[in-house]
């Protein structure tokens, strides 16, 4: 058997599920041929039986050696090594890769397996910050994959090349290679394990460079793939992570919280997966932004236990808890440890915020220069928005409100394009402060109220308290019973906006706008948009 070229690599017909396939093979386990044991191993893995999969693959490896099929034994050793690496067991994984290399040499094997064993070396180089060396390994692997017409190898090699290119700063070429890998996944005879690996790795890379639109598109595809195989266990937790990340950006915090909690439970169930660390970190981020600092700290510590460093979130938590010294020390250490541009990109915005909060302007300016340099390398809308926002923060601290307003307006425009309401509200809050410094109180109040409404909808309590303190609003009864959201709708109606435009600006549906308008008319005892606007101006709502 040559698993790399066989259409029955996993032996699953269209009418079967992975659970049924596993049960059918398991019932005959003692009489299975090595080829069928290989199928059983992956049926076990895809139904969540990781350790059983590894044990069966080890047995299959030895069976292939006994009957003189060393090439297939190498492939088994390769996958054992890869699956152990996914579990975070690098020493054991490295041992199996070494065994596979020795078999290649001892048996003078020439085939796709030679290319497969270049992949761990490429991943190791990539993880060690040697993207150029990783690129060479992946290119060589791709050449072998094409030569032996191995779709799994060629697809994984394309994935590796794309990641290496991105780490080297060649974003356009890197993204092109990742898209090519995704097209291969959808159009070629790729094994389900490789399909899941590619989906998750591409989406993770898109998130890493803040390519939110592409991450959202591929996350939807991954969700469909997982849903089409209801008994598939691997990748489902990572799918939840990626989907909840998108929800979080789009302001769907309740749904993101539910999905992230599911992901934490799924990924931390024995034996657990390293991806649980990212799930716990993102869960902590939501609680921090909602103001539940006890829960946030709990989950940052849990993320750290699973191998995900809890920065910059933990430093921002300390800042919110008024533990300034701890915040500065944490973010400084994280900043010093960040070696690559992508690592720095995760830290720099929080570093700037914390340094500005403690009046360390020199350090903040230095960090902004680095952020601008990174933003020029990674041309993504999200990064441009972050950079403009940080520039606005610094201009504000430098007492240059006009420059701050220009930067923050650019940031706000980009946040709206990305449908990122929390970030848009944060920009509006700073705009309110900038207008106030200029002496334009009307514009300041409008921006602050807009931020207030969004923070209230998101239940972002710490940010809401900051806006409330600046506005000093303590008398909601003055607005004739209108809620803050209804006041926001009324303000936009007064500006002449139609329902669709109002819905777009407030990140709600047109039907919700209609419901708010009906409530406004009832509470103010008016019958039209014109009458509601006149009432609002008469009673100084706006």
Image: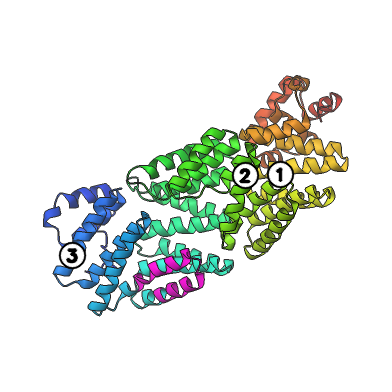
Location of the N terminus by quadrant is bottom left
Q: Residues within 10 Å of mark 1 (few under 14, many from 20)?
A: some
Residue 213, given in percent of the width and then of the height, sits at 58, 54
State yes or no: discs 2 and 1 in contact (Cβ < 8 Å).
yes
Side (left or right) of 443 relative to 14: right
Residue 241, given in percent of the width and then of the height, sits at 47, 46
The residue under the point 40% across, 58% down is 197
User: Which circle's residue, 2 or 1, is located before the other in the chain?
Assistant: 2
Front label number (2 vs 3) = 2
Q: Above or below — where is 400 with respect to 189? A: above
Residue 527, given in percent of the width and then of the height, sits at 76, 23
The residue stretch that appears in magenta: 115-141
Does the magenta portion include 416? no
Front label number (1 vs 3) = 1
Residue placed under numbered mark 2 in the picture: 327
Residue placed under numbered mark 1 in the picture: 357
Residue placed under numbered mark 3 in the picture: 62
């Amino acid at each position: 058997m040559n698993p790399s070229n066989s259409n029955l690599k996993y032996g699953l017909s269209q009418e079967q599920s992975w659970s049924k396939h596993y049960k059918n093979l398991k019932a005959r386990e003692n009489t299975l041929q090595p080829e069928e044991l290989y199928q059983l191993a992956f049926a076990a893995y895809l139904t969540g039986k990781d350790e059983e999969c590894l044990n069966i693959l080890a047995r299959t490896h030895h069976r292939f050696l006994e009957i003189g099929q060393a090439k297939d034994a190498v492939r088994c050793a390769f996958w054992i090594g890869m699956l152990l690496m996914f579990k975070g067991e690098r020493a054991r994984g490295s041992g199996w890769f070494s065994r596979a290399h020795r078999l290649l040499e001892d048996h003078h094997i020439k085939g796709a397996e030679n290319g497969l064993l270049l992949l761990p070396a490429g991943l190791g180089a990539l993880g060690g910050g040697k993207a150029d060396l990783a690129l060479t390994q992946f290119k060589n692997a791709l050449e072998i994959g094409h030569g032996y017409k191995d779709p799994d190898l060629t697809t994984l090699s394309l994935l590796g090349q794309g990641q290496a290119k991105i780490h080297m700063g060649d974003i356009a070429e890197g993204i092109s290679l990742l898209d090519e890998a995704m097209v291969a996944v959808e159009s070629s005879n790729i094994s389900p394990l490789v399909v899941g690996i590619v989906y998750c790795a591409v989406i993770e890379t898109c998130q890493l460079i803040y390519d939110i639109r592409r991450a959202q598109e591929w996350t939807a595809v991954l969700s469909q793939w997982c849903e089409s195989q209801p008994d598939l266990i691997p990748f489902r937790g990572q799918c939840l992570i990626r989907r909840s990340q998108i929800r979080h950006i789009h302001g769907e915090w309740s749904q993101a919280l539910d999905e992230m909690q599911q992901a934490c439970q799924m990924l931390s169930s024995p034996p657990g997966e390293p991806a649980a660390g990212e799930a716990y970190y993102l869960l902590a981020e939501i609680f921090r932004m909602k103001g539940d600092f006890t829960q946030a700290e709990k989950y940052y510590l849990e993320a750290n236990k699973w191998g995900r460093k809890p920065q910059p979130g933990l430093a921002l938590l300390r800042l919110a808890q008024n533990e300034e010294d701890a915040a500065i020390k944490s973010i400084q250490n994280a900043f010093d440890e960040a070696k690559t541009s992508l690592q720095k990109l995760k830290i720099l915005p929080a570093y700037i915020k914390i340094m500005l909060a403690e009046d360390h302007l020199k350090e903040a300016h230095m960090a902004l220069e680095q952020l601008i340099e990174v933003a020029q390398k990674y041309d993504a809308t999200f990064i441009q928005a972050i950079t403009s926002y940080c520039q606005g923060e610094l201009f504000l601290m430098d007492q240059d409100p006009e420059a701050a307003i220009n930067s923050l307006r650019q940031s706000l425009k980009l946040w709206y394009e990305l449908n990122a309401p929390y970030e848009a509200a944060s920009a509006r809050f700073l705009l309110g402060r900038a207008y106030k410094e200029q002496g334009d109180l009307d514009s300041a109040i409008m921006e602050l109220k807009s931020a207030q409404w969004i923070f209230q909808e998101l239940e972002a309590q710490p940010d809401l308290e900051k806006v409330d303190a600046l506005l000093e609003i303590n008398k909601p009864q003055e607005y004739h019973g209108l809620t803050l959201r209804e006041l926001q709708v009324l303000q936009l109606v007064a500006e002449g906006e139609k329902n669709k435009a109002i819905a777009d600006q407030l990140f709600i549906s047109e039907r919700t706008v209609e419901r708010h308008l009906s409530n406004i008319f009832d509470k103010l005892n008016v019958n039209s948009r014109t009458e509601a606007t006149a009432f609002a101006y008469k009673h100084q709502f706006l």
